[in-house]
Image (spheres, grey):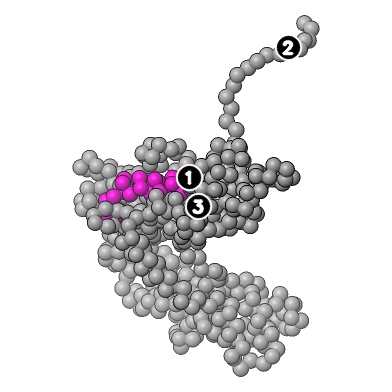
Amino acid sequence: MGLQLKQNLKLTQQLIMTPQLQQAIKLLQLSRLELVETVKQALEENPLLEEASLEFSTQEENKEKTSKDLIKLVKIDEKHLLKNAEWEDYLGYFSSSSKVIREIEYQDEKANLEAFCASKPTLESHLLWQLHLSSMGDEEIKIGEVIIKHIDRSGYLDTNVEEIADILGTSPERVEQVLKKIQQFDPVGVGSRDIKECLIEQLKYLGQDDPYLKEIINNYLPYLEKKNYNYIAEKMGLALDKVLEYVEIIRGLDPKPGNNFDEGETFYISPDAYVFKVDNEFVILLNDEGFSNIRVNDYYLALLKENSIKEREYIESKFRDAVWLIKSIHQRQRTLYKVIESIVKFQRPFFEHGITHMRPLILRDVAEDIDVHESTVSRLTTNKYVSTPHGIFELKFFFNSGINTEEGGEVSAESVKYHIKNLISQEDPKKPYSDKKIADLLKEKFKIQIARRTVAKYREALGIPSSSKRKRYF
């Protein structure tokens, strides 16, 4: 069979991700602070974009009309977006009454008081401060500075004295002497090489020199963790009551002395929207703090009148980028408002009464309600936060599975977790509830029927240990 060339016509449909569409999708999943940075970067890179005051005079309105006339020189579909798609448009469309704005300003004023609080010192700075205030000599201070730099976040030495001695060209004995002094700094036990040394150093500071205490720490810590006090009493030849007294002393020690110190920057959550209850209705206001009121610069548009300019193609290109950015941001804010509005509608009992009244909700419910794709809702609810009457929550928090009740209704998984946490907080420490008992109490008090293994899963998700580890003997 011979080879031959043929020409065929074929009509197909293909979805192409244009750079503009990719930008719009990217803006959807940006957090509020990331969006602010994106706008600032666009203002620096695109000369056609400029910041404008939110207060427009009559003269500026006249310039706006002139600019719209100039848009006719540029052949693109988004002509109406030059001045219409400014920040004040979505602020006007999505903002609420002046009463709510005043309330938000008051809330912001209270929240910003945190900025006046001094940050906590890091463990390293706290130890160095004590080192330089001590009576140690210059050589010891030099050794101490190296030791402190090798103390991890939990307060333990992450190397050995031999390596530090090699670094400084001194003897391990000399490093050991300085280390013992640092271990008596605040917090006591910092710089220890293991948990046993840490606890024993704290006992020395407290003046507890009972040999039985040291024996329990050195030989029976695994049994102490499992609360097998009878085994410890039998092996040590002590009465159980005496062992429990020793356990109470050890319980007051800190196995991780460095955990109470900051080791990095403090991050604050800036909500993307506020939800307030006004006259029995919930009002949504998007957070515009930090956003620039951007629009297209009239000067560059006026240059388009001159058909002979060489930069015409460049200006038209930058103009398209500017208009698309304004349009994408406007669409993002509009969709965000609709998503939050839909969440408030579905989760109104939560906004009224709190987490115990939270309902099951999935992404598809909101997507169908506002007529967008499920993936759009997923992107838009990532790294977004809303301030509610019950605190600040991530938008993903409102989406959770449901559990059937005996009355035929459904309750959200988050509500069940809250009930489990509340039941455990009220239990008798000497007789903690087992997972089976918690499941029975949920069925008895709240008509929620779930299996024991489900209780265990939720308890572990909350970071709550099992009943055997929660049990107290005194």
> Element type at marker 1?
helix
Q: Which residues are magenta?
A: 332-353
Q: Is residue 253 visible?
A: yes
Nearest to the eye among marks 1 and 3: give it: 3
Name the disc covering residue 62, or none. 3
Per the image, the residue denoted by label 1 is 331
**Label 2 sits on residue:** 6
The tag earlier along the polypeptide, 2 or 1, is 2
Residue that lies at the very extreme toward the top in this rendered image = 1
What type is the residue that disc 2 sits on?
A: Lys
Marks 3 & 2, CB-CB < 8 Å contact? no
- Count residues near mark 1 (Cα–Cα under 10 Å), then give few for <14, some for 14-19, many for 20+: some
Q: Which picture quadrant has residue 437? A: bottom left
Q: Is residue 343 magenta?
A: yes
> Quadrant location of residue 17?
top right
Classified by dominant secondary structure, the portion drawn in magenta counts as helix
Amino acid type, callout 1: Gln
